[in-house]
Image (cartoon, helix red, strand yellow):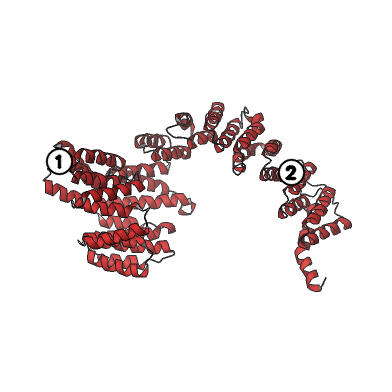
Amino acid sequence: MDYYERMRIKTVLWPLLLSFSLGMSAQAASPADPVSKSSALDGPLFYQLLLAELNARSEEPGTAFSLTLDAARKTNDPAVFKRAVQLALQARSGGSALQAAQAWSQAIPASREANQFVLQILLGLNRTAEAVEPIKRAINLAPLPERREVIGAIPTQFERVGDKQVAATTVQKALSGWLNDRDVGASAWASVGRVWLQANDKSAAIQAAAKGLALDVKAEHPALLALSMMNPELPQAERLVKQHVPHARPEFRMAYIKVLLGAQREDDVKAELQSIRTQFPDYADAWLIDGALALQANQLESADQQLQHYLRLVDAKPADQLAPETKRGRSQAFFSLAQIAQLRKDFKAAEAWLQRIDNPGDVFRAQLRRATVIAKMGRVDEALGLIQAQAETSEDDARLKRSAEIQLLRDQKLFDRARATLKTSIAQFPDDLDLVYDLAMVEEKLGDLVQMEQLLRTLMAAKPEDPHAYNALGYSLADRGMRLPEAKQLISKALELSPKDPFITDSLGWAEFRSGNKEEALRLLQGAFKDKPDAEIATHLGEVLWSVQRQQEAIQMFREALKLNPDNETLTETVQRLRIPL
C-alpha cells in the first residue's frame, strides 16, 4: 500500500471510525437509541471495523458486512448496526439488511430507528404480512403526543407494496388494538380506510371512515378520507363529510368547497362560504373565493366588496409573515379587481390594481396584463414597449410575451401589424405551432380565407389530435354558410377529440342552425350555455330562439350576453342586425 493509498484511507475511514467510538463514549444517549454506558470498542474491535471498511472499499461487501455486524453485536452501538444495514443495502442483499436491522432492534428494543428499518426492509422484500409486529412496535415506541401522527403516516409506507389486499389486511390487523382507543381510534380507522382505498376496495374504505367518525365526529383524518372519495356514485362519503363539517377547521371546509366547485355545485359552494364567513369572519380565503364567484357571475359590486375585504384581512398581517399561498391569493385579488375596473371602463383604476402586484411569481403576468390596459387607453406603442421590456427567465416567458403582443394587436384591430409580427416570429420560431394558429385567425380577420384554410390544414397535419384547427375551420365555414356538410364534419371531428368542450359544441350548434336544423341547434346551444355561460354562446342561442319566434326568451338571452361581455363583437352585430329591443 503506497503513501497516497494510506492517506486516502486516513481521510475517508478515520472520521467514520471516530464516529463509532465517540458514539460510545462522548455522545449523550438519545431517547430513540439508548446505548450502553461504557464503550466496548477496544483495540481489536477498532481494528475489526477498520478491516471491514477496507473490505467495503475493495468491493468485498460480504466480508465487510459480517465483520461490521459482529462488531455491532459486541458493542451494541447503534451507529455500527446502522453501518451494517447500509453495507447490506449497498450490496443489494435485502436478507442481510433485514438480519442486521432485526439484530439492532433486538439489541436496543427502544430504538425507533431500528424498528423503522425492519419495517421498510420487510416491505421492500415484499414480506408484507410480516410487518404486523413492527407496526405495533412503532406505535408503542412513539410518545403519546406523536402516536396519532405515526398512525396517520402508515398508509404512505404501503403505497409501493405490490399486493394491496395483503397490505390492507396487514395494516388492519396491526392496528386492531387501537381501533377503539379513545385518543387515536379515529386516526387508526382512517389509516385502515386509506390502505383499503389503495386496494381499490371503496366499500371497506368508506366503512372505516364511518367507524372513525362514529368514534369521534370531530376527528379530521376519517373526514378527509371520506372527502377524498366524494363523488355522485358514493353518496355516503358526502354524508360523512357533512357530519364533520360543523366541527371542522375552516381549512377542511375550504377543501370541501374545492370538491364542490369541481362538481360545479355553485349554490352549495355559496352556502358553505356564507357559513364559514359567519363562523370565522376573519378567515380570508372564504372572502377571496366568494369574490371570485361573484365576479364570474358578473356581480361586480359584490365581487369588489368581498375582494377588498379579503385584502384588508390579509394586509393586516406583516408582509414577511404571509404564507406563499396567501401571497398568491393576494395577487389573484389584485388581478380580479383589475378585471372589475376594466369591465367598468375604469382603465386607470385597473392599471393601479395591477401595479400593486409585488409577488415575484406574478409580476411578469401582471405587467403583460397592464400592457393590455394601457393599450385600451389608446397608448398602443407604450403598451407594446412594456411587453417587450419584460425580462424573460424561461421559454414559457418568451411564449407569453409573443402571445400578449399578438393579442394586443388583435384587440386593437391592428391586423396588418399582427400579421407582420406573426410572420417574423414564425421565421424565428418555426416549431411554435401556436403562432401558426394565431396567424390563421388574423388571416381570417383580414378576409384571406384561402390562406387561413391553408394554415389550419397545416396544423391538422402537424397535430392531428388537436381539436382547435378543426373547430376553427369548421366554424369559419359555417358562419359564412359555406360548405356546410364539410363544416359539420370538421366540427364533429373536433368534438370527438374534445367531447366536453362547450365552445366546440357551440360551433356545432351554429353549423346546425346555418344548415336549417333549428331544433338540433337549440338543443346543442342550450347545453353549451349551461356548461359555459359565455357571451358568444348566449348570442348564438338568442338568435336561434329569435328565429323560432320565442322572442321573450331570445331577448332575455341577449341581455345575459350583455351582462357577460358588453363589448362582444358578435353580440353587437347580432343585436343591430336583428334590431333587438334591449
Residue 262 located left or right of residue 151: left
Q: Nearer the viewer, mark 1 or mark 2?
A: 1
What amino acid is labelled 1 in the image?
A: Ser
As helix, strand or loop, the secondary structure at mark 2 comes to: loop
Report the front residue among 554 and 362: 554
Can you see residue 412? no
Can you see residue 512? yes
Residue found at x 37% / y 67%: 429
Report the front residue among 340 and 452: 452
Q: Quadrant of the C terminus?
A: top left
Q: Where's residue 40, x and y in %?
A: 86, 51
As helix, strand or loop, the secondary structure at mark 1 comes to: helix
- Which quarter of the figure has residue 347? bottom left
Q: Which residue is mark 2?
A: 111
- Which quarter of the figure has residue 178? top right
350 lies above or below 209: below
Q: Where's residue 575, x and y in %?
A: 15, 47
Q: Where's residue 127, x and y in %?
A: 69, 40
* Marks 1/2: CA–CA distance: 81 Å
Badge 2 density bin: few <14, some 14–19, many ≥20, Cα 10 Å = many
Q: Which residue is mark 1?
A: 547
Q: How many marks?
A: 2
Residue 42 located left or right of residue 134: right
Residue found at x 13% / y 44%: 580
Residue found at x 77% / y 56%: 61
251 lies above or below 217: below
What amino acid is labelled 2 in the image?
A: Ser
Badge 1 density bin: few <14, some 14–19, many ≥20, Cα 10 Å = some
